């Protein structure tokens, strides 16, 4: 995310970087895997689905909420031994019928983090392991349908997360919108993005983008198997939030993904630039040193236990891992200086929430006085008292009557929104397929309404999962209508490349002149060029 020198490098009360790297907490190690408390798939009363024949073999899932659900379906071989830090290898076919009834392993990753419990209550915390390359699939029916396929890429930066969260359950979206939903697990942090080509040579050419190559392997699996689940391989949408939105934007710049997806949705994130090889090599050198290895011992990393790699990763403050502009798999910055031509014909839907930073446990959500607000904004925006007073005057004029703590939250959250706006404008300037923009400002009633429209708050509405996610949304009745409106918009976009439907006002495409934006709340409305003075005052 690019920011001017005047912008929020550390928004008041939280660290933006904390979403990319979480603290490693204590865990129990058994049999080479990290064992965590888990919400297991309860299939005691579930009926089996009909068998599905895939390229790997026959599958049998469970009937769930009116959908046929398949959990832990392998799309690639476990990335161990020689496959660690390498491009994924296709999963070996199996004999007989595989029961796809249990959530698979998540990628090795740090645990815990300074985030709000309202979201993390929905983390199954399934066992992690390097045999994590699996997907979950929901379909309304196993038939010869030609339904849109929506492939979800989870958040957590490029460091943590899982497609197995209850938050991402695809049964309601699948059944209510007649789409096939796929959620993905792929390699993360040093397992997915430790760039070793600069030290170890050609055999590590894929190491910096192994996690992204995993996602491409999923899209290839979808191409080859969508029809077996009643899906249309010619109509695939990638969508994701936070780190998942960044993954969407990176895929739009990767030639290896061209033709494997046809629409794209990025929520509360973007990816303007990738990590440069020289920077990534320096990170790899730090990691080798922390692992007790010399620069000429790169091969030893394939021999170390998973836990040792995780401990080394966690021990290095500020280690930045993510997609690398390696000249092979990612040949350019995703959206700098312009939108990538390789995805010119792919429509893009983007959005952000009004109070993104309230996702971080350190963000102040209780009432504060004017002096505290001034102090926090002086620190976060690097302005003096006069500069903060001018900034607040501009925000008050455009946002109206808000509390002190809410102004602190909105200003801090604009660092998310800035990159989203830049990405959409560059996509529109390409004058290919359209871009669409939303601004989610419906406020949750969870925690007595203090969290407002926080980062992740829009996901339950996109998935039509507001009851499953009551810890996040609260229990208000207005949730249901908005969930129908938003999930229908996402599904219509997946189906046609246009999010419009009868439940919303007309939603024009986005361009840098009108900046038409759908405000998603209890009374959706389109606003042209919202908050221009505030944006200019913050970023210049």
Image: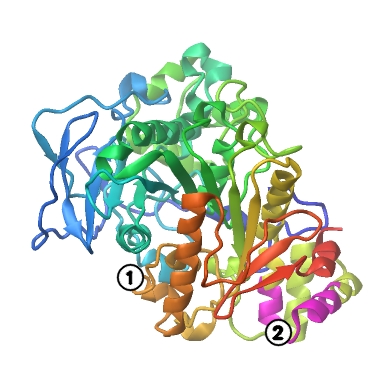
Residue 21 visible in the current orientation: no
Q: Residue at x 35, y 51 (%)?
A: 181
Eyeballing the image, is 141 above or below 73?
below
Q: Nearer the viewer, residue 227 or 312?
A: 227
Q: Nearer the viewer, residue 286 or 336?
A: 336
**CA separation, marks 1 and 2?**
30 Å
> Residue most toward the right?
386
The percent position of residue 253, horizontal first and vertical second, equals 61, 34
Q: Nearer the viewer, residue 56 or 388?
A: 56
Name the residue nearer the viewer: 376 or 72: 72
Kindly state the secondary structure of the residue where label 1 is placed.
loop
Q: Residue visible at 23% across and 60% down?
A: 39
Left or right position of 256 against 175: right
In the rendered image of this protein, does residue 419 appear above or below residue 229? Answer: below
* Up/down of 171 relative to 233, above or below: below
Q: Which residues are magenta?
A: 391-409
* Residue at the spot of label 1: 468
- On whether residue 397 falls in the magenta region, the answer is yes
Position of residue 21 measured from the top left corner of the image (x, y, whole percent): 52, 49
Residue designated by label 2: 402
Q: Is residue 112 left or right of residue 145?
A: right
Q: Earlier in the sequence, mark 1 or mark 2?
A: 2
The scheme the figure's colours follow is rainbow
Which of the 4 image quarters holds residue 10? bottom right
């Amino acid at each position: 995310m690019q920011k001017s020198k005047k912008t929020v490098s550390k928004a008041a009360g939280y660290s933006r970087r904390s979403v990319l790297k979480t603290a490693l907490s204590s865990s129990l190690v058994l049999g080479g895997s990290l064992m965590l408390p888990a919400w297991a798939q309860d299939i005691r009363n579930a009926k089996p689905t009909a068998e599905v024949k895939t390229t790997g073999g026959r599958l049998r899932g469970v009937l769930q909420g009116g959908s046929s659900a398949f959990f832990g379906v392998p799309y690639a071989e476990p990335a161990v031994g020689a496959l660690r830090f390498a491009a994924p290898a296709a999963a070996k076919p199996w004999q007989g019928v595989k029961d796809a009834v249990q959530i698979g392993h998540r990628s090795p990753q740090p645990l815990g983090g300074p985030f709000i419990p309202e979201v993390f209550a929905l983390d199954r915390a399934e066992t992690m392991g390097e045999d994590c390359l699996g997907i979950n699939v929901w379909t309304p029916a196993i038939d010869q349908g030609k339904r849109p396929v929506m492939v979800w890429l989870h958040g957590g930066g490029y460091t943590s997360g899982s497609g197995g969260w209850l938050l991402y359950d695809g049964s309601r979206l699948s059944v209510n919108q007649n789409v096939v939903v796929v959620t993905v697990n792929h390699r993360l942090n040093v397992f997915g993005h430790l760039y070793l080509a600069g030290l170890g040579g050609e055999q590590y050419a894929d190491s910096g983008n192994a996690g992204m190559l995993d996602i491409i392997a999923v899209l290839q699996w979808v191409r080859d198997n969508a029809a077996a689940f009643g899906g249309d391989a010619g109509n695939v949408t990638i969508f994701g939030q936070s780190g998942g939105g960044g993954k969407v934007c990176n895929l739009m710049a990767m030639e290896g993904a061209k033709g494997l997806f046809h629409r794209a949705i990025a929520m509360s994130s973007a990816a303007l630039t990738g990590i440069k090889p020289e920077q990534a090599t320096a990170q790899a050198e730090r990691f080798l040193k922390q692992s007790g290895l010399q620069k000429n011992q790169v091969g030893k990393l394939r021999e170390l236990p998973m836990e040792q790699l995780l401990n080394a990763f966690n021990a290095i403050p500020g280690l930045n891992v993510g997609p690398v502009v390696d000249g092979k798999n990612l040949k350019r910055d995703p959206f700098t200086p312009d939108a990538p031509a390789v995805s010119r014909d792919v429509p893009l839907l983007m959005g952000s929430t009004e109070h993104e930073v309230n996702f971080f446990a350190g963000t102040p959500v209780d009432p504060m006085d004017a002096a505290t607000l001034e102090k926090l904004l002086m620190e976060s925006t690097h302005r003096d008292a006069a500069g903060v007073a001018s900034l607040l005057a501009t925000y008050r004029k455009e946002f109206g009557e808000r509390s002190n703590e809410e102004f602190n939250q909105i200003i801090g959250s604009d660092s998310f929104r800035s990159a989203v706006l830049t990405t959409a404008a560059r996509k529109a300037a390409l004058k290919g397929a359209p871009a669409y923009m939303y601004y989610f400002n419906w406020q949750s009633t969870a925690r007595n309404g203090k969290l407002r429209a926080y980062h992740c708050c829009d996901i339950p509405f996109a998935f039509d999962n507001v009851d499953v996610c009551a810890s996040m949304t609260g229990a208000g009745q207005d949730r249901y209508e908005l969930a129908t409106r938003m999930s229908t918009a996402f599904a219509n976009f997946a189906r046609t490349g246009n999010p419009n439907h009868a439940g919303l006002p007309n939603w024009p495409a986005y361009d840098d002149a009108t900046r038409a934006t759908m405000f998603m709340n209890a009374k959706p409305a389109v606003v042209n060029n919202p908050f221009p003075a505030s944006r200019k005052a913050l970023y210049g």
